[in-house]
Image: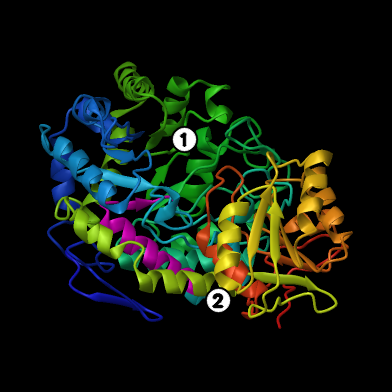
Amino acid sequence: MRIGRRIVVSGITTVALGLAAAPAAGADTQAGPRPCEARLAGMTAEEKVGQMVMAVTHDGPDGMPDDLTRRSLQDLKIGSVITSEPRTPGLAARYSNQVQRWARDTRLGLPVLMSGDFEFGTTHNVREGTTPLPNAMGLGAARDPRYAREAAVITAAEARAMGFHWNYAPVADVNTNPANPIIGVRSFGERTDLVRDLVETQVRAYHRAGLIATPKHFPGHGDTKTDSHLGLPSVDYDRATLDRVHLPPFRAAIAAGVDSIMTAHVVVKAVDPDLPATLSPKVLTGVLRNEMGFTGLIVTDAMDMDAIAKNWGTREATVMAVNAGADVIMSTGEYSTHVDAVDALLDALRDGRLTEARVDESVRRVLALKCEYDVAGARYVDPRAAGRLSGNAAFQRRALAMGVAGTTLVKNERGTLPFDPASGARTLVAGAAQVEPFAKAVDAASHGPVTAWQSATTAPTDAEIADAVRRAGDADRILVATYSSGPLPAGQAKLVRALQATGKPVAAIGIGLPYDIASYPDVPAYIATYGTTARIQRVDLTMHKAAAEVVFGRRPGGRLPVTIAGLYPYGHGLSY
């Protein structure tokens, strides 16, 4: 069906510009299961297995998809893609149109599901001209489902305007391990009820706004000590803990009618001590399908991640994942890996390791999603409209409101904050990551001059620290931005203490994980922004702006969605 309605959420109105929306439950439309079933009956084996592979696209010098992408669509019959980060909304829209034109020029002419990792808005994949939104932990700190809903609506509006249909979000992991090297601020927090409620809120909002939501990483990646991009994580907790802590967000998503769920490359020993969830029939079919009653589409996490590729190889793992219960294989490597994925499925179908019934089951789910979201009816998008809608002033205002609501004033002794924005006082912004964009945000909020200093790495040397202290001699007040994706490098804590020793007013800003203050607990003032993820040093202008406004007097709304052990409890947060 075509959207003929407005979606209004807390002042945000998105007009459906011919984009697709999910029909109401039980709706009887021509794009129902019977036409999809007719499509399935006429497909060759090659066309079927192609629908079961989601491939990353490859680009030419002009930023548009190259001939390898065309071959993926036309020779391998690929049914869904994830793009390699087109730079602007207009380019993303032209990009998706080209992908759809190539898909149209195949025997069946089936449209492609365009997908992206839009965890913190479309900015995650389209870096310019879009609306940067808080990470999930920032929304968790805001404690207001309205903001989570608004974030989903903004993401869906921009994504659909650019031609995307499928979002690999929200993150449903309960981040119970502060040392988790890969989830961290991507999670709403450490408490199951908070994560459950915000996951359910976003699933419903995405569905209403016509974007496929995909909670991840089933059955939970929040208590791991290993990054599955680099190794094979495992968790030792018992089945009762799995049921009580990690599964409820996924149960809530299923109850909300979620269409797809992504797997985790994590060994859950209480269910299957031998295989990661992605490859485990006990986890995907036993727990997710049979116990939890999920009938939608299961998509794997990227199969070229070391957790899978280095232990089983992508060809073997592709077949294992489908036999375990997965419907779509995420292939994010070179063109040759897409060939391997398709060939592995074809070989397994021919030699009996995969049955035709099992393949048909997965293809039926892929086709049903394409029908439900009317991907064929909204195959092409207007690049100019995408550019006008994405990153518009209303979205930016709402994003900043979310950012301020999530920004958490953790400590404020001796009235260190707020700084007086009207004075001509000189401010030094120092740190080890993203100092320049944060300093620009500070400069915009302050009447006095602002200077910036950043170390060459995230571990400042003694010589660099001495240089920062010298620069502080010309400042009246100091902000120190610290960043960690795990334990804070010792040099950053030493930098904070050295700048404190100058005797000037000092406030520290944790721009990544909120735990940094544990390494420098004597700092007089500390703000957590949850703005930077472990693997992506993105420039989060929204959270930088929010933090700067809080530094200069805007009232912060955040409360810790995690515990800072020995210092601050879950739910702690100060205000002015």
Q: Position of residue 561 (x, y in %)?
A: 67, 66
Q: Amino acid at mark 1?
A: Ala
Q: Amino acid at mark 2?
A: Asp
Q: How far apart, in angstroms, are the residues tagged by discs 1 and 2?
A: 32 Å
Q: Which residues are magenta?
A: 147-168
Give the number of callouts.
Answer: 2
Relative placement, left or right, of 372 versus 518 is left
> Closest to the observer: 32 or 338?
338
Q: Position of residue 60 (x, y in %)?
A: 28, 30
Question: Few, some or many C-alpha atoms within 10 Å of disc 2 (few <14, some 14-19, many ≥20)?
Answer: some
Q: Residue at x 80, y 51 (%)?
A: 470
Q: Quick check: can you spot residue 178?
A: yes
User: Residue 459: which quarter of the image?
Assistant: top right
For residue 144, the mark is 2
For residue 302, the mark is 1
The answer to whether 372 is drawn above or below residue 23 in the figure is: above
